[in-house]
Amino acid sequence: MDIILTLPHRLLISDQCGATEGVVSPSYSVYASSNPLSSSIHCYFKCFDSSTMSSIQPIPADTFKLGFIGAGKMAESIARGVVKSGVLPASRIQTAHKGARRAAFESFGASVFENNNQVVENCDVVIFSVKPQVAKDAILQLRPLLSQKKLLVSVAAGVKLKDLQEWAGHDRFIRVMPNTPAAVGEGASVMSLGAGATQEDGEIIAKLFGAVGKIWKADEKLFDAVTGLSGSGPAYIFLVIEALADGAVAAGLPRELALGLASQTVLGAASMVSQTGRHPGQLKDDVTSPGGTTIAGVHELEKSGFRGILMNAVVAAAKRSRELSQN
């Protein structure tokens, strides 16, 4: 497979990271973070995300085809993001479906076949976007077509690389853990490379998933914790937004205004963390004036164990992910 990529330059880590050349962490590395948060995150590739795709050369359409096994909403989100960012034209994206999901892919120009065999035969990269409980059967059914020439990717939660590689019959496999905000181009994804996947393979997948948010590379042993944080995290934040809005309603705001302000406040705060590179504790201190309203609110959160509750939620979800992956 002849895939041409214009690779980004190595970065100098910003002042927050000591202004040294990017270094690869033993456990993880960042493929899509334009602003390092601290010295614990080492950036060594230029950003792969929706905000920087315009400066990155697309994958040449005449040498590359992307296929999806499974035509659900996650597959659609990735495919639409890839097309919108210009990484690939819709004509080079393929899936198979006979039901209502067929129209969803055809609506933006993707090719939709009658069966998965056609997708695998035609494509250089095949993403298995299926439920964890059917991943084994989906891969085994296609195994005769899954040669080492094809880069395989799974987004099935909890399904380990060793199993994916065994079912496929080769180890050129990459496991990716995305999350639901990929549907609006703000996904937080983490990938782990199988033994047969090259760095160039990782760069291709970083480019594809960077079209729907940000993607990091990490050791697979961290994936249960990843699930507890970014995988389950959107649900925690939905609860936070709802609770903030409810509090505002209790204080007298109309519901629509309260929800709008709560949503934008969370979005704005997250953007400040990612764009300034400052520790969230520093940003919190900046807005808590002595004897002011904000410190009064923070005091109530601390009395209620707010930090511990969120920490426990991440740990509990990570534990449950570990339990499910062992079944």
Image (tube, helix red, strand yellow):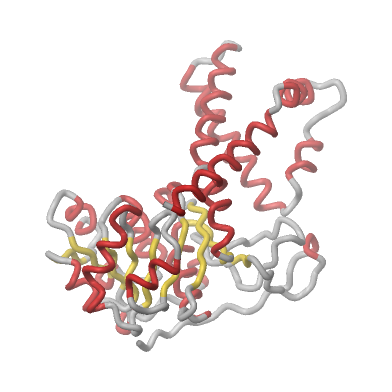
Residue situated in front as seen by the camera: 75 or 128: 128
Q: Name the quarter where the N terminus is drawn.
A: bottom left
Q: Which residue is at a point 23% across and 71% down the rendered structure image?
A: 142
Name the spot of residue 118 as percent of width and height, x first: 17, 73
Name the spot of residue 176 as percent of width and height, x first: 46, 62
Q: How many numbered callouts?
A: 0
Name the spot of residue 163 as percent of width and height, x first: 40, 66
- Name which quarter of the figure residue 76 lies in: bottom left
User: Against 243, is 114 above or below?
Assistant: below
Image side of residue 325 versus residue 94, left or right: right
Name the spot of residue 89 as percent of width and height, x first: 31, 70
In the picture as drawn, the residue positioned furthest to the right comes out as: 290
Q: Which residue is at a point 69% across and 60% down the rendered structure image?
A: 36
Residue situated in front as seen by the camera: 4 or 158: 158
Q: Which residue is at a point 52% across and 71% down the rendered structure image?
A: 55
In the picture as drawn, the residue positioned furthest to the bottom comes out as: 2
- Name which quarter of the figure residue 46 lies in: bottom right
Image side of residue 146 versus residue 309, left or right: left
Q: Which residue is at a point 28% across and 56% down the rendered structure image?
A: 134
User: Against 299, is 322 above or below?
Assistant: below
User: Against 66, is 275 above or below?
Assistant: above
